[in-house]
Image (tube, rainbow, N blue to C red):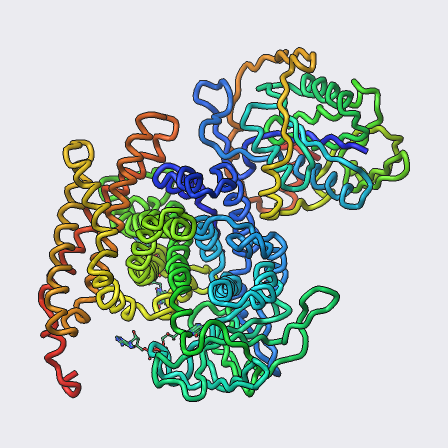
Amino acid sequence: MRVLVPVKRVIDYNVKIRVKPDGSGVDMANVKMSMNPFDEIAIEEAVRLKEKGQITEVIAVSVGPAQAQETIRTALAIGADRGILVTQEGAEPLAVAKLLKALVEKEGAELVILGKQAIDDDSNQTGQMLAALLGWGQATFASKVELGDGKITVTREVDGGLETDELKLPAIVTTDLRLNEPRYASLPNIMKAKKKQLDTVSAADLGVDATPRLKTLKVVEPPKRGAGVKVASVQELVDKLKNEAKVI
Amino acid sequence: MPTYTAPLDNFRFVLNDVLQVGDVFARLGLTEATPDLLDAVIEEAGKFCENEIQPLNLSGDTDGCTFENGVVRTPKGFKEAYDKFREGGWIGLTADPAYGGQGLPHTVSSVLDEMVSAANTSFGMYPGLSGGAYRAISQHGSQEQKDLYLPQLTDGIWSGTMCLTEPQCGTDLGLIRTKAVPDGDGTYKVTGTKIFISAGEHDLTENIIHLVLARLPEAPAGIRGISLFIVPKFLPRAENGATVAGPRNAIACGSIEHKMGIRASSTCVMNLDDATGWLIGEPNKGMRAMFTMMNAARLGVAIQGLGLAEVAYQNALAYAKDRIQGRALTGAQALDKAADPIIVHPDVRKNLLTVKSFVEGARALGLWVSLQLDIEEHATDPKEREAANDLLALMTPILKSYFTDAGFEATNTSMQVWGGHGYIHENGVEQFVRDARITQIYEGANGVQALDLVGRKLPANMGRSLRRFFHPVAHFLEENQTDAELGEFVSPLAKAFGKLQQATGFIAQKGLVNPNEAAAASSSYLRMFALVAIGFMWARMAKVAKARAAESGVRAAFYDSKVKTARFFMTKILPETEQHFRAIMAGAKPLMDFGVEEF
Ligand SMILES: Cc1cc2nc3c(=O)[nH]c(=O)nc-3n(C[C@H](O)[C@H](O)[C@H](O)COP(=O)(O)OP(=O)(O)OC[C@H]3O[C@@H](n4cnc5c(N)ncnc54)[C@H](O)[C@@H]3O)c2cc1C
Ligand SMILES: Cc1cc2nc3c(=O)[nH]c(=O)nc-3n(C[C@H](O)[C@H](O)[C@H](O)COP(=O)(O)OP(=O)(O)OC[C@H]3O[C@@H](n4cnc5c(N)ncnc54)[C@H](O)[C@@H]3O)c2cc1C
């Protein structure tokens, strides 16, 4: 069984994000880029399934600029078997889902493991859209995955607890933070990653129109947090929470 | 708690912009070592150092190693981190692929060494010593010995040591007493006491391979009668086609030292009592075997000094931006605060820049010299190999001594920025000072490095080694003397270089008549040499940074900072050469005049 794992190149989670002075977007010049952490978890999970002998091939896919090849190489170093770069910058979740659908069909993948969201735009949409486009079942926010015969059992983190679903394959899974702890790539695997196959295709090759449909009006920094206040009594605290903050 | 971030941009700048190692490696036939691969390797190694071994640094220092009933335990977390490091394949970075290594360049290994030392110097000792044992066996061992030990040392499942020092003998290895008697079956029975043996006993690996200097019966007295032996903790045995640790050998740890620094690195008394050993290399040629691996080992210690300076700097810089105290003399700057961050104060800036200009300059110099290890090993032209070997031999004592002296000063200066809080153990910055202190002593005390420089390296091959450094500097100065843009870097370098040449002539001449003259000048001369060499690297970096800033624009701030740091070094640090010059020219008399009772 083949598994497709999309990996997105995003600003590294340690970088302090700065908004461009003209409000047109985030300043991307010279900032460190890395693999979206949720995607790292997705790759790790797929590689573990392969190590258990439950699947045969892990394909890492990135939709992005040429530099996203580095992100794919990182996935290959963790243990993915080969990579595909779709050269398309600024693709929105729907376009990414369409591109992935085309690749799923082309490669005959039966399982797609995605990150639940990317830490740059926090959309949390691609997995769900892909499931809809393919007409497959989906289990999002996975904290545990067990692959069975023709089915997959997924424990999901939902409000108020854990929910366990069983899905028929083929299926879509999106990962939450606690699913696993991604490994460090070993030196031999970093060296091997360089020799693994990495193909490049364009959106046009896949017959997908990836033109953006959303228009960004303005990007601003979140408001600075104001200073705290000291309250004299529990009574005052409850009062403030009720009447000023209106949270209780 | 201190933090560490691998300075990836600075590594990239030196490797790619300044030294253009990609071209060098391609020319040497190291086709795997492409810039993008090296980048991925360095980044992942950096991540490991930041997240897995740095967090154990302070706790490792607090807890130290323990010794009980002959068993040495490393501090909490070390075993797990070592296993991960080993499984990551990092120990075999430069090792021969035939033995399971990755065959990557030594230059990359120097980068890894810096990151490991910065993150946790004590931790780095264990794989570091294995590297020394690997080199000794791979260069002097028989094929059988290589096949037996190198795969395990490459993997890291076994570790290594270097057993030189004895109670009565440190610098002067001619005084070694440990004895090795042939046993008739090709093995030897080795008996004696070794002290201060790093990683001599610990709980990280299944076996420990000791390389022991000892004396054969009837061996000539002194340094010409020393041989090198392999003495494993457990005798290797073949089992199902694999080599495993077999019966216990008669080499045991008697106690461990309680030390000023590197407290998570075990420093052991090792007692050998008719322990089984195998001769490595030729009888009585043990010192020659040691010498061929010394360049790499000394470079490794130099880099420990550098790594500690880097991590101390990072933490001093963060503190200087955060700590508010006093107002800027020219008027308050942080109006929303009760005081300004101390980085506004000129003296704090001087402290920070003294360290920054040392670390970045020394890094460039260290990697340039490391590159000679790769050229020496892989160049096809024997002339090129010879040139690399000459430069390496010349620069090794300079780097060992200066990087560790200046590295120690750098940790101390960084601690000063922390004020009283730097003196407090829990803040972790005084540890850097204590850890750095040993680097000036072991692997050849720094004063002895200076002697090596003036006594052996200057006269070597009629001054040929010296020319390997003097010629590139002269060439650079000539090439850039008319460039007005670079004048502020070229002319102070030219001046200091002129003085260095003059001092060299003085020492060569006086030393011929009276060796005490050369020896008395040696440590000042070594410092002067190091400052000129780092000045040379700064001039080169300034040139590259100016060109890059003009062409790219995007990283202008990074390159601008390089140019400014070069300027600081040329105006504030390089003039120290004047003082050393005067001290050298004053000759030996002011110190040799004293009778011992007059001190
Ligand atoms: C933490 C630690 C770890 C160590 N690890 C190892 C190890 O793994 N393996 C190992 O074999 N050893 C190890 N050593 C020993 C170390 O290499 C020696 O301490 C070092 O070589 C100096 O020898 P010594 O201590 O006997 O000093 P001495 O040789 O007694 O020197 C004392 C002083 O005299 C100076 N001096 C000596 N001779 C001369 C001379 N001819 N001219 C000018 N000055 C001179 C020296 O520079 C020094 O300042 C370790 C030591 C320590 C403290
Ligand atoms: C072991 C110990 C014992 C002590 N005992 C006592 C005691 O008995 N009583 C007591 O009251 N205190 C005591 N202290 C406190 C000690 O006097 C302070 O630590 C010292 O005055 C420095 O202050 P600080 O630590 O706040 O450093 P900071 O004032 O924060 O200084 C940090 C760094 O910034 C530099 N800096 C600060 N301001 C300026 C400026 N305007 N211009 C240039 N550089 C500047 C400093 O030189 C220093 O390098 C003790 C401290 C220690 C560690």
Q: Quadrant of ligand 2?
A: bottom left
Determine whether, in the image, residue B492 is placed left or right of residue A210.
Answer: left
Task: Give the percent coordinates (x, y) of residue B467.
Answer: 22, 52
Task: Give the percent coordinates (x, y) of residue A248.
Answer: 71, 35
Q: Residue at x 20, y 42 (%)?
A: B475
Is residue B146 at least partly visible in the picture?
Answer: yes
In the rendered view, would you say B93 is above or below A1? below
Q: Residue at x 19, y 63 (%)?
A: B524
Determine whether, in the image, residue A143 is placed left or right of residue B583.
Answer: right
- Front-lying residue, A98 or A26: A98
Task: Give the percent coordinates (x, y) of residue B572.
Answer: 20, 49
- Front-lying residue, B253 or B64: B253
Q: Residue at x 60, y 57 (%)?
A: B86
Q: Residue at x 80, y 38 (%)?
A: A55
The image quadrant of residue A174 is top right
Task: Give the percent coordinates (x, y) of residue A222.
Answer: 54, 28
In the rendered view, would you say B465 is above or below B327? below
The image quadrant of residue B405 is bottom left
Counting every numbered tag in the picture gives 0
- Front-lying residue, B596 or B214: B214
In the rendered view, would you say B318 is above or below B281? above
In the rendered view of the protein, which quadrant contains the C terminus of chain B? Answer: bottom left
Is residue B423 at least partly visible in the picture?
Answer: no
- Front-lying residue, B472 or B215: B215
